[in-house]
Amino acid sequence: MNKDLFVMTERKANLFNIKCLIVIIGLGIATLILNELNFFTVNKDAVIFSMIPAISFAFIPIMIYLIHDKILKKDNSILELPYFKAIVLVFCFLCVMILCVILSFHTILLLVIPTLLAAQYKNNKIMALASLTASLVSVVIVVYASLLVGIYDANLMKPLTLDEAASFENRLNLLTRKRIFEILLHYVIPRLISVAAIDFIALSINKRNDEMLDIQLSLTQKVQEESDARAKMHNGLIEHLADIIESRDIETGEHIKRTKNYVTILVNKMKEMDQYKDYLDDKMCDNIISAAPLHDIGKIAVSDLILRKPGKLTDDEFAKMKIHTTKGGEIINNILNELGDEDFLKVAYDIATSHHEKWNGSGYPNGLKEEDIPLAGRIMAIADVFDALVAERVYKKPIPVEDAINIIINDSGTHFDPNIVEVFKEVKDDFIKEANSKK
């Protein structure tokens, strides 16, 4: 079992058993009160003599937990420590044994409680065998001990009367070989069978649950392995596509690497600031960052004469350049559609087709406006424009980084999403550092 999951299950089991001990203490206190009010006909001294030690034993694991976790506030909860379950089970056994001995061997089924608590833990053969053995040995001890010090039972102590049974010596004299054998045959063995049957059922259910959990964990691991393999395939495909773009245009290839870094900075800060928190969960953030290198994939369909032209593009050439957005969406749909990750495909498509849209609706290819523009495209737009400003291209010289920052800020609400620009202001130093590191 996964170590973290094992620790979590042990913690929950210990916490559940602590709650069970609290219930036992509550029932014990209630019994004390009701007996004092003559609701029961049990000897009051016997009830007090049994309940107070039993409650004390049940309280010890609770007290250890409270001191360790709540008062001292240790880093690692005692519920996660392997020896704590042994403490819980030992003191639970002592608690129920006292009750069974003093109150009556008829309450002997209480001895299954520790085994039921043990069944909460991950199946452990040694612990299960120890718990079963302890409960069966306890049956023998409880029956004979109840004869010696328990409340009066006419059948068990026959032929003693209630007055005669008040003497420990009289009780001790009952234990002849014949009487020991009769008690074993009529009292011990039937209760051994009952306790063993219940313990066996409880531990069998526990074992079956553990087997089902192991199967579930195995399936989960396989799903995770398949997911990791799919992610690796995604990343490998993205890298190969980026290499294809770079082979066509070195500047575009470097631009892809830089813009991914800018997108990473923006997305992480947006997550930290709770910007668009209903949309930007961990998976979405990973998808946006992973898909960022594909934003210019459509340039594969643009002529080299246009991509590498040193001067300004004509209107006709610019119109041909703009098709890289729609072509990028088509390429992504055609290549990535077979991978089966619809969420990633959607993000990659949005980035490729909408990173040239503008907040005021004057962008291309669809003239989308404000929040009609996919969020991934709005994030990509800032990273794309910033790098285009500060990087040298065949048709232009770079501008100072500070000027590029001012352009992004001034275009808030016209070109860019104002909310994302506010995030950009918080990370502008990181953008400057990233831009300068590439020079």
Image: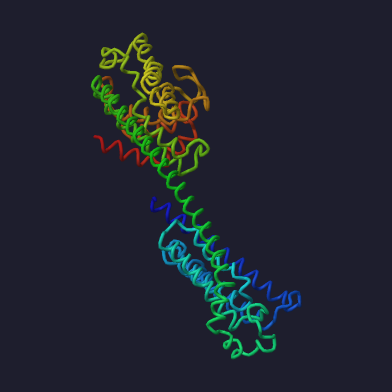
Q: Is residue 59 above or below residue 226?
A: below
Which residue appears farthest toward the right when viewing the image? 38
Q: Residue at x 52, y 61 (%)?
A: 199
Q: Nearer the viewer, residue 404 or 250?
A: 250
Residue 336 position within the rendered picture, expressed as x and y whole percent measured from the top left: 38, 23
Q: Is 108 on the left-hand or right-hand side of 308? A: right
Image quadrant in which you'd find residue 320: top left
Tell me which colouring the rendered structure shows. Answer: rainbow
Q: Which of 245 and 431 is in front in this view?
A: 245
Which residue appears farthest toward the front when viewing the image? 178
Would you say residue 18 is visible in this rendering?
A: no
Q: Nearer the viewer, residue 371 or 301?
A: 301
Q: In this view, does 169 lie above or below 41?
A: below
Q: Is residue 172 above or below residue 82?
A: below
Q: Nearer the viewer, residue 291 or 267?
A: 291
Residue 348 position within the rendered picture, expressed as x and y whole percent measured from the top left: 40, 26
Residue 237 position within the rendered picture, expressed as x and y whole percent measured from the top left: 31, 27
Q: Residue at x 47, y 55 (%)?
A: 9
Image quadrant in which you'd find residue 357: top left
Q: In which quarter of the image is the C terminus?
A: top left
- Label count reads 0
Which residue appears farthest toward the top when viewing the image? 316
Q: Is 15 on the left-hand or right-hand side of 250? A: right
Image quadrant in which you'd find residue 197: bottom right
Residue 313 position within the rendered picture, expressed as x and y whole percent measured from the top left: 32, 13
Would you say residue 90 is visible in this rendering?
A: yes
Q: Is 370 on the left-hand or right-hand side of 30? A: left
